[in-house]
Image (cartoon, rainbow, N blue to C red):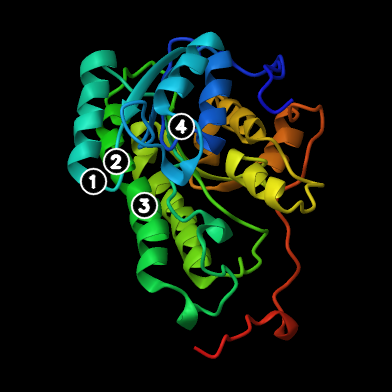
Amino acid sequence: MQGAKQPIAKHLKTLTGRVAVVTGASRGAGRAIALVLAEAGATVYVTGRSASAGQTTEGLPGTVENAAEEVTQRGGKGIAARVDHTNEQDVAAFFERVKRESGRLDLLVNNVWGGYEQYDGPDFDLPFWEQPTEKRWQGMYVAGLRAHFLSSRFAAPLLIGRKADAPPGLIVNTVGWAYGEYLRNLYYDVAKSAIIRMSFGMGLELKKHHVAAVALAPGFMRTERVMAEHAKGPFDLSGTESPEYGGRAVAALAGDPRIMERSGKLFTSGDLAREYGFTDVDGKQPEGFRIPPYGEDEVPQSTGT
């Protein structure tokens, strides 16, 4: 059911005529967000490094071209763009393309992420002094936090430059959050916390320009990567959500005429589902990601290295 087309809650506002950019959209949450925006009628630029002309990242199927085709099939207009979001020149050139082709931008969803959490080899739960510093830094800060910042920096002039009578512009930064609990990995926790704080600051600075910025925390999603790991050794998927659940949260925020009142804040997909009245593809409303408090018995065990 994860990939099946499901109706969005009827009261969600149409996004016909809106132009959106979703980064990191060749698969996973980014792809799902793009597909739901398409159902609402948006034109969606889908970006990422996995393209038909080269190798896909993570060794998983899915390219920006595939995602763009699906966007069009869902009722929107999909435009593929291979972009390395760690490269400032690449990012700047991409947003110049958006300006040249579309003349505007209404929504930016920053979803690119190179950290891959515990699925990238080294033990995610090791203490910070035993973590692979450069790998974590590149994946979570350069290809995560900095990538979000770069896209926002070059998207901002387009968002600010929209017509005065247009609906508010919006930046959505996807984050990891567990209701204030420590996320069990210092690199990960700090990177995600920084993106939340970045959303707050962006909201303040963009407010006078009629542009909002928010942080959105999906729950435990059944992405392609998660399901590939599950196939190797099954683990509990109860309480998980489809990637499209977060997509419906983004569509609801983008269609909210009072979005400026929410600017700078953090939301979970589950909380927004109950507020706006949408469900996941299976009709359920999963809660946000929760983990028990971090205690002395949960301190990462040193390997002695």
Residue 290 visible in the displayed image? yes
> Whole-Å distance between the Cαs marked 3 and 2?
9 Å
> Whole-Å distance between the Cαs marked 1 and 3?
9 Å
Q: Given the image, on which type of amino acid does mark 1 rest?
A: Asn
- To which residue does mark 2 refer? 84
How dense is the environment of label 3, judged by Cα within 10 Å: few (below 14), some, or many (20 and up)? many
Q: Is residue 33 left or right of residue 201?
A: right
Of labels 1 and 4, earlier in sequence is 4
Residue 191 picture location, percent across and down: 45, 61
- To which residue does mark 1 refer? 87
Residue 69 picture location, percent across and down: 46, 15
- To which residue does mark 4 refer? 26
> Whole-Å distance between the Cαs marked 2 and 4?
12 Å
The N terminus: image quadrant: top right
Q: Quadrant of residue 105?
A: top left
Name the residue at 45% across, 51% down. Answer: 200
How dense is the environment of label 4, judged by Cα within 10 Å: few (below 14), some, or many (20 and up)? many
Mark 1 touches mark 2? (CB < 8 Å): yes
Name the residue at 58% across, 44% down. Answer: 225
